[in-house]
Image (cartoon, helix red, strand yellow):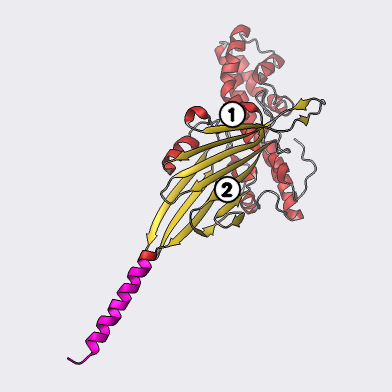
Amino acid sequence: MRLRNFRTTNYCVMKSTLIIMLVLGTLLFSSCENPMIFETDVHADGTLDKTIMFEKGDSVLINKNIFGIDSTKGWSGKIVALPAEKTETGSDKVQYKILFKKRFASVDQLNNELNSTSDTLFHIHSTFEKKFRWFYTYITYTEAFQPINRFKMLSPADYLNEEDNQFIDRLPGEGKAISKADSLYLQMLNVKIGEYFTNMAIFNEEFEILTELVKRSNLENKWMDTLVRKKEFIYNHIEKMKGEPDFALQMADSLHIPLNRESAIKDSPILAKDLNSRISFMGFANDGKYINIINMPWTVVNTNADSISGNRLFWRPLVTKFLFKEYHMYAESRKLNLWALLVSGLIILLTIFFWRRSLKPR
């Protein structure tokens, strides 16, 4: 994967950190093709209004998307056709703006729906806390985008060191300028993730599929030994063949492994389905451009938002922020408790009154 046209004010290049998707989709991280806006209205009673909008996408998103939401789960959906755009072939392509809304009675209900354990859905974990501090009542609300890396047989820790993690932590939001030195570091980080980590992650899982196909064909042990000896050969084909859904079958043919053809053709899609589905999710998520908005009920006193407008808070995180670890967004707001102020004033007045009365001679 080659990095191209990097500019410090354009972070679409950050998307070039994983792989080309299989037939289900393509991981094209250098283009921001899936712009999404999330918005949460936080209410003082703990209820939450959640809005998720795909600013541009195919109409299929109304029923099938990376959040697993649709009208059957209580979400109100609205779809609006956008002006047609010319494709590379010269044909017109119509895309749509798709809007989902739903009210949740509590943060637990929200998490049950948007923080599932599925490997093919986007995970958002939220918390809501209300604290009384006499003169003020505080509300703290947080949202955390969970890591979107779904590879199961390779740890990012083997490829990213502490310096890399610190660099990712200090990267600013989408569209903010960075120094030339950081630009260079970013390019090298993309190469490390996009070419080394990703290729090895795919290799590990494809090799596992290929090994299982050999086992199911009940072949002699020498063919398993062939796989071990040819690991480097198989790995070297990852870069140019990682868009192939039947990669394992093609590798078996290249190595002249006599699989039970009928059985292998039937088993291969089943064995590869989980990997293909995870890659499809990662492709869409990594090709996204994100804006998250949280509307707090009272005066904001603490937050890590990229920008603030009154009680309205904005985050524009780069995908790199939550490739391998959680990305936390928090906001704290407070309101003055007038009744506590009045009670405190009354207590002070009564204290003064009885104190002065005690000073008078009897």
In terms of secondary structure, where does tag 2 sit?
strand
Q: Amino acid at mark 2?
A: Ile
Question: Quarter holding the N terminus?
Answer: top right
Label 1 to label 2, Cα distance in Å? 21 Å
Asked if the magenta segment contains residue 352, the reply would be yes
* Residue occupying the far left of the picture: 362
| Relative image position of residue 275 (x, y in whole percent) | 59, 26
Disc 1 target residue: 62
Task: Name the one closer to the observer, 209 or 60.
Answer: 60
Comes first in the chain, label 1 or label 2: 1
The reply, left or right, for residue 305 in relation to residue 359 is right
**Disc 1 and disc 2 in contact, CB within 8 angstroms:** no
Q: Which mark is residue 146?
A: none
Any part of residue 263 in sight: yes
* Residue occupying the far right of the picture: 90
The reply, left or right, for residue 355 in relation to residue 134 is left
Which portion, as a residue range, is magenta? 340-362
Any part of residue 325 in sight: no
Neighbours of disc 1 within 10 Å: few (<14), some (14-19), many (20+): many
Neighbours of disc 2 within 10 Å: few (<14), some (14-19), many (20+): many
| Relative image position of residue 150 (x, y in whole percent) | 57, 33
In which quadrant of the rendered view does residue 87 lie? top right
What residue is rendered at 69% in x and 37% in y?
194
Task: Name the one closer to the observer, 271 or 16.
Answer: 16
The reply, left or right, for residue 20 in relation to residue 150 is right
Disc 2 target residue: 293
What residue is rendered at 73% in x and 42% in y?
13
In which quadrant of the rendered view does residue 237 lie? top right
In which quadrant of the rendered view does residue 156 lie? top right
| Relative image position of residue 284 (x, y in whole percent) | 64, 33
